[in-house]
Every structure is written in C-alpha cells, then in structure tokens.
Amino acid sequence: MTSTVPALHPAVAEFVAADRKMLIGGRWVDAVSGKTFETHDPATGNLITRVAMGEAADIDAAVTAARAAFEGPWSRMKPNERERLIWRVGDLLSERAEIFGQLEALDNGKSVAIATAVDVGWSADVWRYNAGLTTKITGTSVNPSMPFAPGGQFHAYTRREALGVCGQIVPWNFPILMATWKLAPALAAGNTVVLKPAEQTPLSALLLGEIFEEAGFPPGVVNIVPGFGDAGAALAAHLDVDKVAFTGSTEVGKKIVHAATGNLKKVTLELGGKSPNIVFADADLEAAVAGSVAAWMFNHGQCCVAGTRMFVQRDIFDDFTQAVADAAAQAKIGPGLDPTTELGPLVSQEQFDRVSGYIEAGLADGGRALTGGKRWGESGYFIEPTVFVDVEPGFSVVDEEIFGPVVAALPFDDEEDIAAAANKSIYGLAAGIWTKDLSKAHRTAAAVQAGSVWVNQYNGFDTALPFGGFKQSGWGRELGDSAIDLYTQVKAVNIAL
Ligand code: NAP
Ligand code: MG
C-alpha cells in the first residue's frame, strides 16, 4: 500500500519552522537552563522541531506567575467574564481545527481526519460546555438545627470556591484533548494552571497557548511548561501548588500521590486500563465486529479505555474472532497525515519496543496470533493489528496494559460467569457489552467494575458524562459537571442572626 502525505498547512509549516518556547506569565520564554529537546514525527522518526526544556526552575517560575494571576485579575473576574473568554477558546479552536488537527497528526502520528474531528472538534465542545458551567457554580442554603445553641437563629450556606494554582500533567495519546479536559473546568472554576504536556507531543499545547493570549486571558492564568518526567515531578511536589491532576500510567500515578504529600495537595488521577469488551452470542454481530475492532484499534490502541480483553461467548467464539481479525487486517496502515490512513504509527521508539515486547511475550506464552504479530514496513513505529487467541489470565497480554493495536480474545460460557472474569483486573476504567437482550445488558452493566459502560457501542464518551476509573484506574471524574467538583472546594458559612 502506498501513502501520499500532503504539504503542511502554511500555519503549521511556520509553527514548526522555529524552535518553540514555553509560556510563563504571558510571555514566551526559553528554559532557565537554555536547554531544548527534540520532538519527532513518528511516521518517519524525523525531527519536527526543538522545544524549550522545562525543569524545576521553570516550573517554579510558572507557579509564581500562576499564583500572582490567581490573586490578581483572575479572582476578581466575574463568572460571565470568564465564560466569554473560555467560550472564545472553543471558537478559535473550531476556526483553526484544520491547523491544530494537522499539527497533532504530525507530532503524535494519529490520523489527521480523527485528530481534526475528534481531538480538536471535541476539545472545542469541551471548552464551550465548561464556559457554560462558569455561571452555574453554586452553593446551597441550609437551615441549621444547632443543638448546642437552642433558641438561636441562624442563616447558613455553602460556597464553592476555586482551589488556587493547579498543576496538570498530560500524556501523548490525545495531547490537546487531555489538556482541554483538564484546563477547561479548572479555568471555569476560577483556578489558574501550570500545564506540563508530554515530552513526545508538546506542540499542540504550545499552539493552544497562543489562543489564550488572543482570547484575552490575563497573563499567568495559563502557563505551559514542556519538559520530561522531572518537570512533572517538580510540579506534583511543588509546595505552592494546590492541586495536581494527572493522566498517564498507573506507575507514574502512584509517584504523583507520593509527591503530593508535602503539602497534601488535592490529587486527581486518570490512569491505565485493561478494559473488557463483552460479546454475547445474541448480539447484532455485524455491529459487534466493527465496534469490537474499533474498541482496541482506535488511536492505534493508545487509549486508556481500549477494549483489549475481548470476551466472546463460546458458541460464536471462533467465527467472531476470525471476523474481527479479518476486519483488522484490512485497515490501511500509513502516516497519520495521509487522509486515507486508518492505522498510523505508535508514538515513539520506546512505545514501539514496548508493544513489540508484549507481542513476543504473548507468542512465547503460547498465544496464537490470528492476524498481525509483527512490525509493518521498515521505517516509522508501525505495528500490525494483532488478535491473540489461545490466551489465558496470567499471560501478560491478558493482564497488562499494552497501549498498542493488540487484543486478547477469551471465550466465556454464561452470563453468570462473565462479570467475575471481566472484573479479574487491577483496573476498572471502561467496559463494552454487546447484546440485544436489554435486561442482560442492564444486569451486566451493573456487575462490571468500570467507570464507563458502553452498550452496543464502544468509546461512548460525551462531554456531559463523567469519566474516570474504578480500582487502580484512577481517582475522580473528569468531564460533565463533576469536573467542577475536582477544581473547587466547599466552604460552609454559618451566621448567628
Ligand atoms: P507516563 O510516563 O505516565 O507519562 C504521562 C505524563 O507524565 C507525561 O507528561 C510524562 O512526562 C509525565 N511524567 C513522567 N514521569 C513523571 C513523574 N515522575 N512525575 C510527574 N510526571 C511524570 O506514560 P508514558 O511513559 O508516556 O507511557 C507508558 C505507559 O503508560 C503506556 O504504555 C501506557 O500503558 C500508559 N499510558 C496511559 C495513558 C492513559 O491515558 N491512561 C496515557 C499514556 C500512557 P514525559 O512524557 O515527559 O515523560
Ligand atoms: Mg513527537
């Protein structure tokens, strides 16, 4: 198969022609150390551009700027003024969807069509949804009984207040979308932010930084410090940061919790998964095949919610897994910038090695690949979509998050058995259920341990629906109005009249 990569949009070409700086206190600055790092095109391994490399000193400067903005203009702004600024970010993103989409596809490797429609298009929606929430953050009024003060009269109410300076650390799989999920509610609730994008994909967040200036945000409300894990660690440990929100691996999530103990800052975690996708024999099988392929192949399997344990009822197991393998094998592989690409490269050499290692381990353990099982092409970080059968719990391909286009298929007999099998995981992020039996769907939805359950679809996200994990998949719920809870604290005021 051949691929045609169109010329870069002039705005993207211009953006990557220069080294990129970091955004601190409304100014674009070099790292204190003067150091930079490279970001690469995963389809070729070629250098895209160099980026200022933030470390602890830069994080410190960004936190100082965020604190000054929090205590200054931002906290004096009315909710409807914040609303207009946040709405404007959504509009500017929509206007520039093509530019942001192409930059994201270039830096991350994902399909430009998906980057534009899903990553950028949905981000715009999340900005607008949160703009609407700014004016709806309310407390309650309470009529206290006050058993210690009989006869007294009281008026009590609660206020929902911003936390202050929030540190936000995001991964490379949905760079601008994960930044948006965190930034939009934090700003809507009146906080200021220091954002650390992933070292593999810093560019879309830096381009977003230009939008804040243009939309009219006061300097220092949003600060963006690209860098490596040590910059994230400095942010998580910083004593003047009131909250840290993290999306990434469960391993680093645990480090964040430890780092936060110095000042007991609030912590939100959105971590890994090994989500079950359960196919009953009575499902609409055509829809279930297509949906089950997307469940683990979307974004090249680099999704925290990927449905990578595909449980199929035994009567249909052989036919169904073969149909999934056949459909997966037809995906057009190529660079994300080619608009006809269906499966792009993994994000980095490290991720390529990691996924290749899991495939080798799956084969060595006795698993059989119905399709895939090896590298695609000679350059770039491409892996063939891989469907494993003859696998069982205990194999690393069944138990561990792979974060590549690899699924493990497991048979099950009855509805009574499936929840126990599906719940045999340290994770609990998402689950898919395919059946035409409504009662069975509801029973299974209640029995699976997962923060999101999708019936007769997969990746059934919505801006208004809370998202987050059970068990070791995380703490807290992003999206929906529950995201505001993550970025506010409640104050109870009780007045003796
Ligand atoms: P990761 O290390 O957890 O990276 C996520 C973010 O945390 C990045 O911004 C990273 O910065 C930063 N970071 C790294 N070490 C840190 C530390 N000690 N303190 C604070 N921040 C730190 O994930 P990864 O290494 O890129 O990927 C490894 C595996 O994690 C994947 O194979 C996948 O299984 C899982 N993962 C899950 C998600 C998800 O959405 N749940 C997303 C990505 C990866 P740098 O990029 O500069 O290191
Ligand atoms: Mg890159």
Image (tube, rainbow, N blue to C red):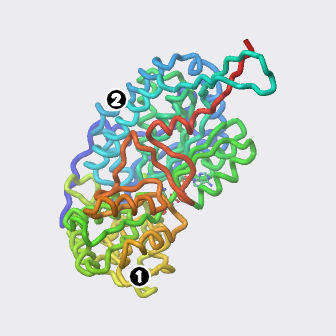
Q: Quadrant of the N terminus?
A: bottom left
**x and y, in percent, of residue 458 in the image:** 32, 57
Q: Secondary structure at mark 2?
A: helix
Give the mark toward the camera: 1 or 2. 1
* Residue furthest right in the image: 148
Q: Nearer the viewer, residue 310 or 229?
A: 310
Q: Secondary structure at mark 1?
A: loop
Q: From the viewer's perspective, is residue 434 above or below residue 359?
A: above
Q: Please tell me which of labels 1 and 2 falls first in the chain.
A: 2
Q: Identify the image quadrant of residue 446.
A: bottom left
The residue drawn where x is 49% and y is 73% is 399
Q: In the image, is 21 to the left or to the right of 12?
A: right
Q: CA distance from mark 1 to mark 2?
A: 48 Å
Given the image, on which type of amino acid does mark 1 rest?
Val
Residue 92 - label: 2
In this figure, which residue is indicated by the disc labeled 1? 391
Q: Name the residue furthest front.
A: 151
Determine whether, in the image, residue 261 is placed left or right of residue 402: right
